[in-house]
Structures are given as C-alpha cells and as structure tokens.
Amino acid sequence: MLAAHARLAGDPAGLDLHDDLYASGMTSHSTVNVMLGLEDAFDIEFPERMLRKATFGTISAISEAVAELRTGIQ
C-alpha cells in the first residue's frame, strides 16, 4: 500500500515499523490515498476519530488501526 500510494522518497520495504512516514516523504495528500487504499483492500472505513496524522505516521500505527477496525473494536 505504501509503495503504491505514499510517494515516499525510498523503498518502504527498507523502513522500520516505527520510522516516521512523514519524515520519509509522505504528504497529507498521499496519506488520503493510503487511507482509501486500505479501506478498499480490507473493506473497512476509518472513523472520524482515527483521521489524525498519528494514525498514519508509522507502519506500526497503520497496522494497529487496521487491526482494530478489522476486529470491530471501536
């Protein structure tokens, strides 16, 4: 998802789970594209409370958010 939508400066495969994606080149526009791609891929919808920079700031944060939405914990 990051490779397709985040427009990072380098290959996202080389990032640590806790690396700052915004420091790696992700913009607010590409964040929206990542979010939409995740929603399509996992058949989820990010609620308004999750529409924060922190939700998409790291691979770990994204994974946690998707896991939460897929298990129905809201």
Image (cartoon, rainbow, N blue to C red):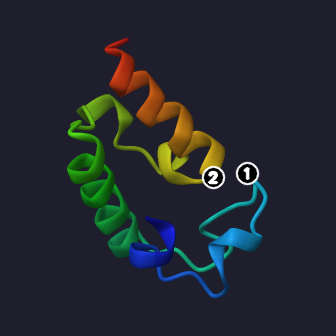
Mark identifier at residue 17:
1
Q: Residue 37 occupies which quadrant of the picture?
A: bottom left
Q: Position of residue 46 (x, y in %)?
A: 27, 37
Left or right of residue 45, residue 31 in this image? right
Q: Are marks 1 and 2 in contact (CB under 8 Å)?
A: yes
- As helix, strand or loop, the secondary structure at mark 2 comes to loop
Q: Position of residue 21 (x, y in %)?
A: 62, 65
Residue at 25% over, 47% down: 39
Q: Crowding at label 2, few (<14), some or many (≥20) Cα neighbours within 10 Å?
A: some
- Precedes in sequence: disc 1 or disc 2: 1
Q: Foreground residue, 18 or 54?
A: 18
Left or right of residue 52, residue 40 in this image? left
Rendered-image quadrant of the C terminus: top left
Rendered-image quadrant of the N terminus: bottom left
Q: Crowding at label 1, few (<14), some or many (≥20) Cα neighbours within 10 Å?
A: some
Q: Position of residue 45 (x, y in %)?
A: 21, 37
What residue is disc 2 on?
58
- In the displayed image of the protein, which residue is found farthest to the bottom? 9
- As helix, strand or loop, the secondary structure at mark 1 comes to loop
Report, in whole angstroms, how far the alpha carbon at label 1 lies from the one at label 2. Answer: 6 Å
